[in-house]
Image (cartoon, coloured by chain):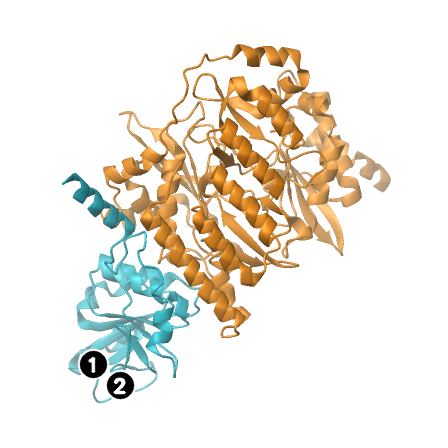
Amino acid sequence: MYRYDEFDHAVVRDRVAQYRDQVARRLSGEITEEQFRPLRLMNGLYLQLHAYMLRVAIPYGTLSSKQLRKLGHIARTYDRGYGHWTTRQNIQFNWPKLDETPDILAELAEVEMHAIQTSGNTIRNVTADAFGGVAADEIEDPRIWAEIIRQWSTLHPEFAFLPRKFKIAVTGAPHDRAAVRFHDIGLIMQRNWDGEVGFEVLVGGGLGRTPMIAKTVRKFLPKQHLLSYLEAILRIYNLVGRRDNKYKARIKIMVHELGIDEVGEMVEEEWERIRDSALHLPADEIQRIEAYFAPPAYEALPSDDAGFVAKKFEDPAFARWARANVAHHKQPGYAIVSLSVKPEGQPPGDVTAEQMDAVAELAKTYSLDELRVTHEQNLVFPYVKQSDLYALWRELDALELATANVGLAGDIIACPGLDYCGLASARSIPIAQRISKRFADLDRQHDIGELRIKISGCINACGHHHIGHIGLLGVDRKGEEYYQITMGGAPGEDAAIGKIVGPAFSSAEVVDAVEEVVQVYIEQRRDGERFLDTYRRLGEAPFKARLYEEKFHAAA
Amino acid sequence: MPLLKGDQIVDDPWRFVDDADDLPAEGPVVVSLKRWRDDRDVLMARGTQIGVRLTSEQTPGQVEGDLRHFGLVALEFPAFTDGRSYSNARRLRERYNYQGEVRAVGDVLRDQYFHLKRCGFDALEVKEGETAEDWLAATSVITTPYQPASDGADSVLSLRQRRMAAHVE
């Protein structure tokens, strides 16, 4: 993985000192909370319902064991012993004290981490495919480009006061595991007819109160032009994006109102003038960064480990875990392992300091000291030998990180909701916990198959409900929590925005409603159909009929 | 109003003249884009320096052909959160190669001084009683920025290139 050189270290160190001074000015009363607000928001510090919340970036989701141990240390020393993985490859600490936040950042800087631009109307932490570098279907490792973008966007002087926040995601594979079509800019690596590698550039995707699928602004961008092209898009957005209404300020609205063709013309015109500027990436700088992401020294192994195959026959629980949580690796004899941070009945994405320490140790033993954080709030070990899978599974099981539910009904995405967040209309976590318990039977989950349930506690959609096969949106109805159900959303290359199926359900009703929806699928599915396939074939009618028939009867 | 220019508090030789007010008999004046367009001949005939003040809705592209007449372009910040003038300043410096003063006027936070300088601003209006040190304290801490911008400062990218070249030799 990438290692800071002295320049990277200096930038982060300088930023910590600057932030420490800003906090000191606030604590001494030299500046007011109102004046401090924009400063802390440049650095991931939010004021929530009960306390400050610090959001720390995990650029493109890659972590070393050492970094994870440091996160555990921070959780234990400065917080209440746990952290929360977000849907954008960040970790949030929910209880830091303001006067200690500079120390937290100084500790993070020691392990090459920071909280720069994890909030504010800035270019946010760049995200990438959590399987980057190891996915079997990959053209190139997206993390190389995500790191180049991280450096370019860090403390960018022109783009610190954009109309609204700005999120960039990169995938190096055609199978989109990074939801790039729901980002302000999505980058998809492509190979053109000449075999040259570059990017398809998409703009204007997003969730929130106006969900949009990003549109292609350029089919193929040679990779050495990446930064100048991004700068052109950002400059046009900074100048043209709406600032009159916070809810219409994202680039998706600009693209929607002006049309992708007009936006494309403006971007290309700007780009023509800056494409050969100092932003043009020299080949040796690209190579310098590439070298950090070179494949590790893999052992030569058979593509199917005999012991792994045998253990799956012997132990059905292991086989079930392997089916859901182990993915195909590009290197023969290796596997990609997902650690489910969604044990039955627990808040999705919460990890304790003890778990972080233990996972760091396991990553050291089984995954070359490296792990990943996914936008689905799980963890990934990218370099596991098939021959180690059984031993790893047993150790993970003891840590409650081996629930065989990745991609299944129990693998729920949820935002922090009204339990923590000042913007929320309703709670998310208790609903996730109740659904998780309702579908606790793993045999049933495996029978249901791939099912993405995503829960947001308000219209800002941090829980990605729009792209859930089943999405739940919390709404406040005269002080009572209600949940709107959407269906048919999809985050990947078959991107779709879910449709609202009908009137919202009360907190007491909503888990039954989700179960009814799943039941309709079970009754109607054809061979090999996932929930999403059945929904797409039948439309919402049978689901709607089932959900509301009783209500209709009651009303009649 | 005191002026911070070249990291010093200096007397401001320029005078902003509101559209409704008469032009002074002498001395450099700054006028709105509208005034410039309406009174261009009168302004040119005065024989003193002319500056133009652009709102964040306006762009330097609208005065591209006239930039050689201006000793100063003032760019407005109606609110510190309105970042359009950063892009307009960079276009002035980099696209139009404008060499005169580029001044930030309006709602600017001290902690934004770093951003302003990097984007090509070389002057800004400060409040009565503020010192140059107050402003400098907020900028001096980021020693080497990652990205190239309008200030011509060495970026991490260029320093790495230089080091690599030295290494090859």
Mark yes or no: residue A450 visible: no
**Is A388 or A430 nearer to us in this picture?**
A388
**In what element is the residue under mark 2?**
loop
Left or right of A550? Residue A485 is left
Chain under disc 2: B
Quadrant of the rendering where the N terminus of chain A is positioned: top left
Drawing shade for chain A: orange
Q: Which mark is residue A121?
A: none
- What type is the residue that disc 1 sits on? Val
Look at the numbered discs 1 and 2 and tell me whether their residues touch, using CB distance below 8 Å: yes
> Taking A69 as reference, is A550 left or right?
right
Q: Is residue A485 visible?
A: yes
Q: Distance between the residues labelled 1 and 2?
A: 9 Å
Residue holding disc 1:
B42
Q: Nearer the viewer, residue A228 or A526?
A: A228
Determine the chain carrying the residue at label 1: B
Residue A439 occupies quadrant? top right
Residue linked to disc 2? B23
Closest to the camera, between mark 1 and mark 2, is 2
Q: Which residue, as the protein is rendered here, is positioned at the far bottom?
A: B25
